[in-house]
């Protein structure tokens, strides 16, 4: 029998190309959207420009002038004379710098670590944690002026709480907490620390709430105790929160004003309570206005603040990059 002719293999059908969908064009903003963005973005930027950047730039410009703050025609260019006078011929300046450094070191070494310690303890699910948090954070709800008034009552040498306790233990013995130049700065620091501790506690407690508890359990399985777990696991992992706390501590220390202003009796620095912020206020809104002088002091405070914060941030980011 004749063999059947070989059948040709079936031809593969050409694959149909997927239908190309028309690209969606970006939706154009309508008049209502543009108005909304203008209001939401434009108004905060305008407020930032008017209330922050323009005064800062104006202070920098006025720091090179002499002006009594009355008429613009009385502004006279003096160059670096204000800065020369501040560094060489202004007696309260260097004590104020020293007190600001003491304020910074005290705040960084005592209330800030204590606030972190309280946050770590309250994060361990203690009984009545909410009550403790409210009691410790309550001073933060009050303004610094109110805090100053509260501690002024406590420090009152005639009817204050502290002198009442001291007089009960040693009759006839009184301490002038706010009048003694050797004690008044430390008294104000205690009042400031009372409020600052609650602030740091809440900041760090918020960071601990987002911390992975599995890391603590792994450290406990490796035999680490509570102190070792915090120092070697929790604290390094919360580096962003640590940076925020450090920046807040530096800013709170360098711009301290309200508590000292209230406890010091208003404008005019008491001996032992000189701060850069008070010197700025004395020269700008004091009995004799020296706007140029006060602006130069404000620029010095700004440079010190930026240098302290910028140095730490650069070192921190450099470590992260490595």
Image: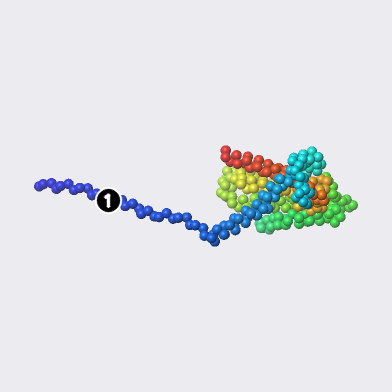
On the image, the x and y values in percent for residue 172 come to 89, 52
Q: Residue at x 61, y 45 (%)?
A: 239
In the rendered image, residue 44, in percent from the top left (x then y), is placed at 63, 55
Q: Residue at x 83, y 54 (%)?
A: 156
- Horizontal side, residue 87 vs residue 227: left or right: right
Q: Residue at x 81, y 45 (%)?
A: 272
Does the image show residue 105? no
Color style of the picture = rainbow
Residue located farthest toward the bottom when viewing the structure as drawn: 32
- The residue drawn where x is 79% and y is 38% is 88
Seen from the viewer's position, the closer of residues 193 and 143 is: 143
Q: Is residue 138 above or below residue 298?
A: below
Q: Nearer the viewer, residue 17 or 261?
A: 17
**Secondary structure found at label 1:** loop
**Residue lying farthest to the right in this orientation:** 172
Q: In the rendered image, which residue does mark 1 sit on?
A: 13
The residue most toward the left is: 1
Residue 307: x, y in percent?
68, 41
Q: Is residue 72 visible?
A: yes
In which quadrant is the C terminus drawn?
Answer: top right
């Amino acid at each position: 029998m004749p063999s059947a002719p070989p059948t040709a293999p079936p031809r593969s059908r050409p694959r149909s190309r997927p239908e190309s969908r028309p690209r969606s064009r970006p939706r154009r903003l309508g008049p209502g959207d543009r108005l909304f963005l203008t209001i939401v973005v434009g108004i905060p930027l305008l407020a930032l420009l008017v209330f922050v950047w323009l005064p800062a730039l104006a202070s920098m410009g006025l720091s090179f002038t002499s002006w009594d703050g009355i008429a613009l025609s009385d502004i006279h260019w003096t160059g670096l004379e204000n800065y020369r006078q501040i560094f060489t011929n202004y007696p309260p300046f260097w004590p104020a710098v020293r007190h600001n450094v003491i304020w910074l070191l005290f705040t960084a070494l005592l209330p800030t670590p204590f606030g972190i310690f309280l946050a770590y303890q309250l994060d361990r699910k203690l009984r009545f944690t909410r009550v403790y948090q409210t009691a410790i954070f309550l001073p933060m709800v009050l303004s610094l002026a109110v805090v100053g008034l509260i501690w002024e009552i406590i420090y009152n040498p005639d009817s204050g709480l502290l002198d009442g306790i001291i007089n009960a233990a040693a009759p006839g013995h009184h301490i002038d907490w706010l009048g003694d130049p050797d004690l008044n700065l430390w008294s104000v620091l205690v009042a400031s620390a009372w409020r600052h501790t609650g602030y740091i506690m809440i900041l760090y407690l918020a960071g601990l709430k987002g911390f992975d508890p599995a890391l603590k359990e792994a450290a406990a399985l490796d035999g680490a105790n509570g102190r070792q777990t915090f120092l070697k696991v929790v604290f390094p992992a919360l580096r962003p929160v640590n940076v925020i706390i450090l920046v807040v501590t530096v800013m709170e220390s360098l711009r301290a004003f309200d508590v000292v202003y209230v406890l010091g009796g208003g404008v005019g620095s008491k001996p032992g309570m000189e701060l850069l912020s008070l010197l700025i206020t004395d020269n700008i809104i004091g009995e004799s206005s020296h706007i140029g002088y006060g602006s130069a002091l404000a620029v010095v405070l700004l440079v010190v603040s930026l240098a302290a914060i910028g140095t730490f941030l650069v070192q921190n980011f450099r470590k992260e990059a490595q």
